[in-house]
């Protein structure tokens, strides 16, 4: 017992309880500091654990050091009497004071050592470990392309049915994050393609290709599929499904095919992904049939009002037959939003329908990706970009890269991020003309004209008959160096009757107008079948033009010195635009055109007011892609009235941000003539040439 008492006495004398308390409290503080630094420096989650481990390892070292420390004279000799009075500090008290100071110092040294070692490891990881982690190649997901299925029945009315099954297999596969699935548009060009599978795989950058066919006969359907390793030219599997033609069987086959591919390629499915794949979209066969028909119309290339009308009719019938058909509601919402965005119907009612359909889809299925994407389109339409991005994040489920994401980022002025998003989307759909065109327009906005041309070239190689793309490519030299020659050549090759949205008429008028061939410009207008020209550009709502033909006539007559004819045409244009503005008071394109009509009429204040209103409706802070165009129109309005300082200020503002037009294009515009020779304008030209 005496030894135990002596031990307890020594523990008290050497302040080990105090040391333990000090160390626990200090260790907790040191651990909190390590956690905070871990989060702030972006270190791995295991770094706070490292700090805790170091503190635990050092605890016995601190206690042992405190216990064995001898002080000045070492341990008390046996039999030495304890001090009897406190009048004079005893030798032991002096020792105790020094001992306590040393125990505090030990604890402090331990904290410093623990945090020091932790800091060295953290610094080393930031300098070397993170770099190695970033340079390590990411685990590559198996790449799969589902080629168009063959309609083996040979009946035209079964094409939509076969394509619908193809689309749904693609949709199911795209839910599996462990696979890299090529997009629909990229694969559709290989319908009836004479190319071998190795060529197709190389062009799509996809190792595995699925091909097959669908044969519907009476009440039965046969679906055969085969998965092929295009590099090794070997079959991974071949399956045939003979089923009674019921909706349940049809949906089951689509699920089985997707899961069969995932299993064959050893792609791990999360519980959430499996749940999404196994979810039954509808139990109504007729509703599903209308959904497939609507999807086929909506998926057709180009922006054609008749396809949107037919698609809307089919999808509305689908949700009428099954009000709980979330996927049909989501697709209908996307159709409405696209119709608004691309100018088929800019009404508030169309937006209301889009929002209602998306919200209904999410009420039915809160986890439906396409419903979140559709709601993102709705937010995008009203320029609520943060909410739009939130919905896109949910829809993409950690796999960023889409046209919508890129559009949002461009309007926010995040150009490099937008390019990255488009490139990510292109990696999944490498032969998608729409994505290639958007990359072309994005580089055009950045005034990287050669890169823009290269992407338009790639899009044209995939779709040589795309008039709008050919015109966009031919317009690049106009924007970049003020050269109208290539655009003239392309316009001359477009046959009569081909004039989508009146854009061919507008561009034919434009090249004659900026080349000062005003009589030829009037002839272009006289041959046109359009009394009103309204078209969208790649920027969606707020881009493009909207003006009556009489406005362009007025601008030509004004330059020709035909004042009376110019005023008559301009006044007609003004009345037309004011009527339309009563219906669409917030369309900046109409205010822009109205400013030009007032300029021809000589109404300076009205012209400037209308141009300023267009800028207010679409400021660059809300739309970095389309807003600058209205700033340039305001500059041209000031220039028409010879107000050089105001004009130069706005042109400088325009040229300092990403936008299509260079100073060379601005110099083409006759509107600049009143200020062209002014020293301040010439200084601006020198700045940007």
Image (cartoon, rainbow, N blue to C red):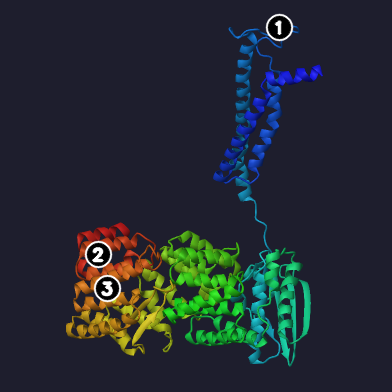
Q: Which badge, 2 or 3, comes first in the chain's sequence?
A: 3
* Left or right position of 510 against 152: left
* Image-quadrant location for residue 480: bottom left
Q: Which residue is drawn at the image coordinates 42% and 89% (left, top)?
A: 497
Sort mark 1 into few (<14), some (14-19) or many (20+) by Cα contacts within 10 Å: few
Q: Locate the C terminus by quadrant.
A: bottom left
Numbered disc 2: secondary structure: helix
Residue matched to label 2: 647
- Sequence-wise, the earlier of marks 1 and 3 is 1
How far, Cα to Cα, is label 2 from label 1?
A: 102 Å
Q: Nearer the viewer, residue 659 or 610?
A: 610
Q: Is residue 152 left or right of residue 687?
A: right
Q: Is residue 95 above or below residue 15?
A: above
Circle nearer the viewer, 1 or 3 = 1
Task: Judge depth for marks 2 and 3 and give the one in front.
Answer: 3
Residue at 26 percent across and 69 percent down: it is 636
The x, y position of residue 262, in whole percent, is 73, 68
Q: Mark 2 vs mark 1: give the one in front.
A: 1
x%, y% of residue 241?
77, 81
- For residue 610, the mark is 3
Q: Residue 626 at what x, y percent from top left?
A: 39, 68
Q: Earlier in the sequence, mark 2 or mark 1?
A: 1
In three-dimensional space, the C-alpha distance between marks 2 and 3, rounded to whole angstroms, equals 15 Å
Q: Identify residue for label 1.
A: 81
């Amino acid at each position: 017992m005496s030894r135990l008492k002596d031990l307890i006495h020594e523990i008290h004398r050497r302040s080990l309880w105090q040391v333990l308390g000090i160390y626990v409290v200090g260790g907790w503080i040191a651990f909190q500091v390590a956690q905070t630094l871990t989060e702030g420096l972006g270190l791995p989650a295991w770094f706070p654990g490292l700090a805790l481990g170091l503190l635990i390892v050092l605890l016995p070292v601190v206690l042992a050091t405190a216990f064995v420390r001898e002080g000045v004279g070492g341990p008390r000799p046996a039999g030495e009497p304890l001090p009897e009075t406190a009048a004079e500090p005893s030798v032991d008290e002096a020792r105790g004071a020094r001992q306590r100071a040393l125990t505090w110092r030990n604890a402090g040294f331990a904290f410093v050592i623990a945090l020091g070692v932790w800091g060295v490891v953290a610094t080393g990881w930031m300098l070397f470990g993170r770099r190695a982690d970033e340079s390590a190649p990411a685990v590559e997901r198996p790449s799969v392309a589902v080629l168009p299925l063959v309609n083996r029945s040979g009946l035209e009315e079964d094409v939509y049915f076969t394509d619908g099954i193809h689309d749904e297999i693609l949709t199911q596969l795209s839910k599996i994050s462990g696979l890299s699935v090529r997009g629909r548009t990229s694969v559709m060009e290989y319908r009836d393609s004479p190319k071998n599978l190795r060529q197709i795989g190389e062009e799509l950058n996809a190792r595995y290709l699925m091909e097959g066919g669908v044969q519907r006969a009476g009440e039965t359907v046969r679906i055969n599929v085969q998965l092929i390793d295009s590099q090794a030219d070997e079959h991974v599997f071949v399956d045939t499904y003979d089923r009674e033609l019921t909706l349940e069987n049809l949906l089951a086959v689509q699920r089985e095919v997707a899961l069969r591919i995932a299993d064959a390629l050893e792609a791990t499915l999360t519980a959430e992904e499996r749940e999404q794949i196994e979810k039954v979209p509808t139990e109504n066969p007729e509703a599903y049939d209308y959904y497939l028909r609507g999807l086929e119309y909506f998926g057709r290339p180009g922006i054609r009002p008749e396809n949107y009308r037919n698609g809307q009719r089919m999808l509305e019938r689908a949700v009428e037959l099954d009000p709980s058909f979330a996927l049909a509601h989501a697709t209908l919402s996307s159709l409405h939003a696209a119709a608004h965005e691309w100018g088929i119907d800019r009404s508030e009612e169309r937006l209301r329908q889009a929002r209602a359909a998306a919200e209904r889809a999410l009420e039915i299925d809160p986890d439906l990706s396409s419903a979140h994407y559709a709601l993102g389109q709705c937010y995008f339409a009203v320029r609520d970009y943060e909410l739009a991005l939130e919905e896109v994040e949910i829809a993409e489920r950690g796999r960023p890269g889409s046209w919508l994401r890129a559009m949002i980022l461009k309007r926010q002025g995040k150009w490099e991020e937008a390019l990255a998003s488009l490139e990510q989307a292109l990696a999944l759909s490498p032969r998608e003309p729409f994505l290639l065109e958007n990359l072309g327009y994005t580089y055009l906005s950045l005034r990287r004209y050669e890169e823009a041309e290269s992407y338009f070239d790639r899009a044209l190689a995939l779709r040589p008959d795309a008039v709008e793309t050919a015109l966009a490519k031919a317009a690049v030299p106009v924007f970049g160096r003020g050269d109208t020659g290539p655009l003239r050549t392309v316009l001359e090759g477009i046959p009569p009757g081909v004039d989508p949205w009146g854009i061919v008429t507008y561009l034919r008028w434009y090249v004659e107008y900026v080349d000062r061939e005003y009589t030829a410009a009037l002839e272009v207008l006289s041959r046109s079948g359009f009394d009103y020209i309204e078209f969208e550009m790649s920027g969606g709502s707020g881009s493009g033009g909207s003006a009556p033909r009489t406005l362009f006539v007025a601008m030509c007559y004004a330059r020709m010195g035909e004042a009376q004819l110019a005023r008559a045409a301009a006044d007609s244009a003004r009345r037309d635009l004011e009527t339309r503005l009563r219906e669409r008071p917030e369309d900046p394109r109409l205010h822009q055109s109205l400013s030009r009509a007032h300029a021809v009429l000589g109404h300076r204040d009205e012209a400037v007011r209308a141009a300023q209103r267009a800028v207010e409706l679409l400021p660059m802070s809300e739309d970095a892609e389309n807003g600058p165009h209205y700033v340039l129109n305001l500059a041209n309005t000031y220039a028409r009235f010879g107000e050089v300082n105001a004009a130069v200020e706005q042109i400088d503002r325009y040229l300092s941000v990403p936008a299509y037009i260079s100073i060379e294009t601005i110099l083409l515009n006759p509107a600049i003539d009143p200020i062209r020779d002014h020293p301040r304008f010439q200084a601006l030209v020198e700045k940007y040439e």
